[in-house]
Image (spheres, grey):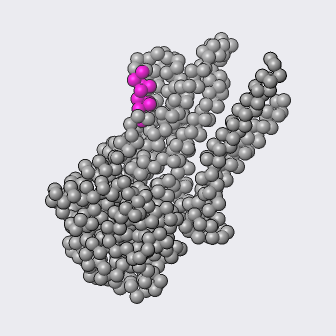
């Protein structure tokens, strides 16, 4: 026995490995062949945390009998990298507007068949044909918001109306910028009067220079708990996404959110269908279900975000409908725009941003 | 020694004692203060998390009904236990082999085992995901556990290498001399001697696996979102004190476990006299 120990050991390891591999592959093969015929229908969603309330998901499950799982990610960049590396299993993904273009360019999503979305016309006209996805070819917007300014009026008097306030030396050490390259450059381009979709080398250099000049005045770059820091008073003014400001503005009356006169930006989170999706019918059923006015209104009332569904508006609670941190008046959105080609823009801005953050 | 000299030495010793007591106290406060704040604010009525507005168990009730949190906790515990067990076993076997035999490529083997410590975890995670996709392995518990073993194995190996280096060859030889078969030597001599270190490496591996975010992000599959991943993804809309409630429960469970093992240890030692 001891003579052949080495041989036996190698054989043992190989056997264990083989069994494990077979078990793994077997489970995947067995799973997929089963789902096409008699196994219960399933749906796998990869979304932002909290944007599809659990009550909405369980109501969908009850109405259709489709077992739904929702997995969450923390940023668009993580989600895109994961899908780009080849991860499969998800059917629907909920990217932000600029990630829709990235996913389309990476050939990871398919064009939607609108004939299966009978509730599509419930969307607001501006969301039926979005600038970043003409004709809503790939995506169906679910919720929207804006990128603007938030300030604490205990420390900053008077209405703030411009991005210039983030460069005000009077607030030195109490200014926060978003730790997100595209978001920071929105402010940098617009404060100089440029459109942030500009690919002009001189304008990009000027925007980068503005960020460099701003750096000594900043408290830091923060994309996570800036709303709390603002409410606590350590930060007086910051660049912000409105959805983060909503909960703190509800408890602290000194917090105000505004869209600067230079325009700001708006964001949407919507659904796209992955090319590798296995449960295509269930996916369309889910999107159509979310486009129902009653469902969209219930979700919006529960999670306090602005829905893209026009038919749902009458059913939204008045307190949410009139909350300026949730619904920015459409008239103010005149100058707000989005990144039209984020992949290309990222390539142009990355070097300067890395230099800025490396200091 | 003169009386004044003696007094001076005593004073210095007393001052040093005080200094160390104070320093230890400060370190304890530094380490425990965040945990205390987490526990305190889990009972806060509002959701701001830093302004006390009143006592309430609202967040515990919310937590109780939050299926997603419990599912994530379950995933984390299962993956942690499995990964820690496998990593401990593999680490022990590797460490023992490296300590006892001089086989070809021993240095390379050692280096490979420690390499995940040097490579940035995100590089490891993305590369592993690409590999899994290539071999068409399904993403789920299997991929998560393998990924976590990869991340945690260097730590268990290092601990077991230290433990096996203190293992006297004489003990094994004495056991063999007294008539133990190789299998009995392993079961009745080596493993009991290595057991404390194996336990320590299991605990460390479990903790690292429980906290892991980067590897989990990339190799988790449908329905296998781990707890830290879920909490981290809640940052966009603001983390609610429900997380504080969960944290408090985890701290309470850990405390109970520690106290029971501590009490057991104490009674065993007392019995031994």
How far across and how far down the image is residue B200, in percent? 61, 35
Q: Residue at x 66, y 70 (%)?
A: B54
Taking A62 as reference, is A209 left or right?
Answer: left
How far across and how far down the image is residue A282, in percent? 36, 69
Q: Quadrant of residue B174?
A: top right
Q: Residue at x 38, y 84 (%)?
A: A312
How far across and how far down the image is residue A240, in percent? 39, 66
Front-most of A160 and A298?
A160
Q: Furthest residue to the top?
A: B177
Q: Which residues are magenta?
A: B107-116
> Considering only vertical position in the picture, is B7 above or below A92?
above
Taking A62 as reference, is B197 left or right?
Answer: right
| Residue B69 visible in the displayed image | yes
Main SS of the magenta segment? Answer: helix
Q: In the image, is residue B33 part of the stretch drawn in magenta?
A: no
The N terminus of chain B lies in quadrant: top right
Front-most of A118 and A107?
A107
| Residue A246 visible in the displayed image | no
Q: Residue at x 49, y 72 (%)?
A: A154
Q: Furthest residue to the bottom?
A: A314
């Amino acid at each position: 026995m001891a003579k052949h120990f080495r041989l036996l050991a190698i054989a043992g390891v190989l056997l264990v490995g083989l069994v494990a591999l077979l078990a793994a592959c077997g489970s995947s093969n067995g799973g997929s062949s089963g789902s096409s015929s008699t196994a219960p229908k399933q749906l796998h969603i990869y979304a932002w945390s909290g944007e599809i309330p659990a009550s909405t998901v369980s109501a969908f499950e009850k109405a259709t009998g489709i077992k739904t799982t929702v997995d969450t990610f923390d940023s668009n960049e993580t989600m895109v990298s994961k899908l780009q590396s080849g991860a499969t299993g998800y059917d629907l993904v909920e990217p932000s507007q600029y990630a829709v273009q990235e996913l389309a360019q990476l050939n990871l999503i398919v064009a939607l068949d609108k004939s299966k979305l009978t509730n599509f016309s419930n969307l607001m006209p501006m969301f039926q044909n979005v600038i970043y996805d003409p004709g809503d070819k790939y995506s169906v917007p679910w919720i929207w918001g804006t990128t603007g300014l938030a300030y604490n009026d205990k420390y900053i008097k008077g209405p703030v109306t411009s991005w210039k306030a983030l460069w005000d030396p009077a607030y030195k050490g109490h200014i926060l910028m978003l730790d997100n390259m595209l978001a920071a450059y929105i402010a940098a381009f617009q404060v100089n009067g440029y459109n942030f979709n500009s690919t002009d080398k001189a304008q990009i250099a000027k925007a980068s220079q503005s960020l460099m000049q701003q750096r000594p005045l900043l408290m830091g770059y923060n994309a996570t708990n800036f709303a709390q820091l603002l409410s606590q008073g350590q930060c007086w003014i910051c660049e912000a996404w409105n959805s983060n400001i909503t909960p703190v503005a509800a408890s602290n009356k000194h917090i105000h959110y505004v869209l600067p006169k230079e325009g700001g930006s708006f964001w949407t989170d919507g659904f796209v269908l992955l090319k590798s999706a296995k449960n295509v019918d269930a996916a369309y059923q889910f999107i159509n279900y979310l486009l129902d006015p009653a469902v969209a209104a219930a979700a919006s009332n529960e999670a306090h975000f602005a829905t893209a569904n026009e038919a749902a508006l009458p059913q939204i609670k008045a307190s949410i409908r009139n909350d300026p941190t949730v619904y920015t008046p459409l008239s103010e959105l005149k100058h707000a725009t989005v990144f039209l080609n984020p992949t290309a823009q990222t390539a142009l801005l990355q070097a300067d941003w890395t230099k800025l953050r490396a200091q | 020694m003169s009386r004044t000299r003696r007094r001076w030495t005593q004073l210095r010793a007393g001052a040093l004692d005080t200094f160390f007591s104070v320093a230890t106290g400060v370190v304890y406060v530094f380490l425990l203060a965040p945990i205390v704040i987490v526990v305190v604010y889990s009972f806060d009525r509002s959701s701001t998390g830093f302004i006390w507005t009143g006592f309430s168990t609202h967040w515990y009730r919310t937590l109780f009904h939050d299926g997603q949190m419990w599912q994530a906790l379950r995933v984390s515990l299962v993956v942690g236990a499995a990964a820690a067990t496998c990593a401990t076993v593999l680490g022990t076997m590797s460490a023992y082999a490296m300590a006892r035999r001089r086989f070809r490529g021993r240095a390379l083997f050692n280096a490979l085992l420690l390499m995940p410590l040097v490579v940035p975890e995100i590089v490891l995670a993305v590369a592993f995901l690409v590999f899994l996709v290539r071999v068409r392995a399904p993403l789920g518990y299997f991929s998560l556990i393998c990924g976590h073993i990869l991340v945690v194995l260097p730590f268990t190996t290092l601990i077991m290498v230290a433990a096996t280096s203190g293992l006297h060859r004489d003990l094994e030889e004495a056991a063999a001399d007294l008539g133990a078969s190789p299998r009995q030597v392993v079961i009745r001599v080596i493993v009991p001697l290595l057991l404390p270190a194996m336990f320590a490496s299991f605990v460390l591996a479990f903790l690292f696996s429980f906290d892991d975010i980067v590897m989990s992000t990339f190799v988790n599959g449908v329905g296998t979102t781990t707890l830290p991943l879920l909490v981290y993804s809640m940052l966009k809309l603001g983390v609610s004190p429900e997380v504080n409630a969960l944290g408090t429960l985890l701290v309470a469970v850990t405390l109970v476990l520690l106290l029971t093992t501590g009490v057991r240890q104490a009674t065993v030692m007392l019995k031994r006299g």
